[in-house]
Image (spheres, rainbow, N blue to C red):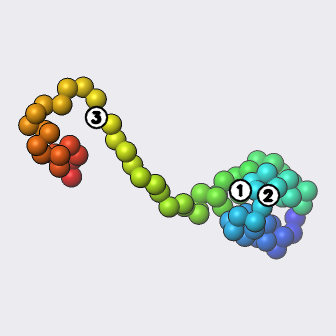
Amino acid sequence: MNSKEIDKLKLRLAGGRITRRDFVRSAVSLGVVLPVATSLSNTVLAATPNKGGTLRQALTGVLPVTVWTRPRSWTRT
């Protein structure tokens, strides 16, 4: 197993230049066993967080009139 080649693959995966499937296929062809290749890809992808979106929350049940007038009380801070 050539660690330089694996490092190059990890950088390409982290940069989005190859897919996870391509990473695992290439790592296995370099002699890495499948569970290790899968674990490496999960580690690399988990280390690159994506920006989150908008959280929308639905209220269920009866909403008392007193809560309508105080929308800041809907969430706990």
The kind of residue tagged 2 is Phe
- State yes or no: discs 2 and 1 in contact (Cβ < 8 Å): yes
Upstream in the sequence, badge 3 or badge 2?
2
Q: Quadrant of residue 2?
A: bottom right
Front in this rendered view, residue 25 or 17: 17
| Horizontal relation, residue 4 to residue 15: left or right | right
State whether residue 16 is above or below residue 24: below
Upstream in the sequence, badge 2 or badge 1?
2
| Horizontal relation, residue 76 to residue 17: left or right | left
In this figure, which residue is indicated by the disc labeled 3? 59
Q: Which element is circle 1 on? A: helix
In this figure, which residue is indicated by the disc labeled 2? 23
Front in this rendered view, residue 21 or 71: 71
| Horizontal relation, residue 60 to residue 66: left or right | right
**Mark 3 vs mark 2, CA separation in Å:** 43 Å
Q: Is residue 36 visible?
A: no
Mark nearer the viewer, 3 or 2: 3
Residue placed at 54% from the left, 61% from the top? 49
Mark nearer the viewer, 3 or 1: 3
In this figure, which residue is indicated by the disc labeled 1? 41
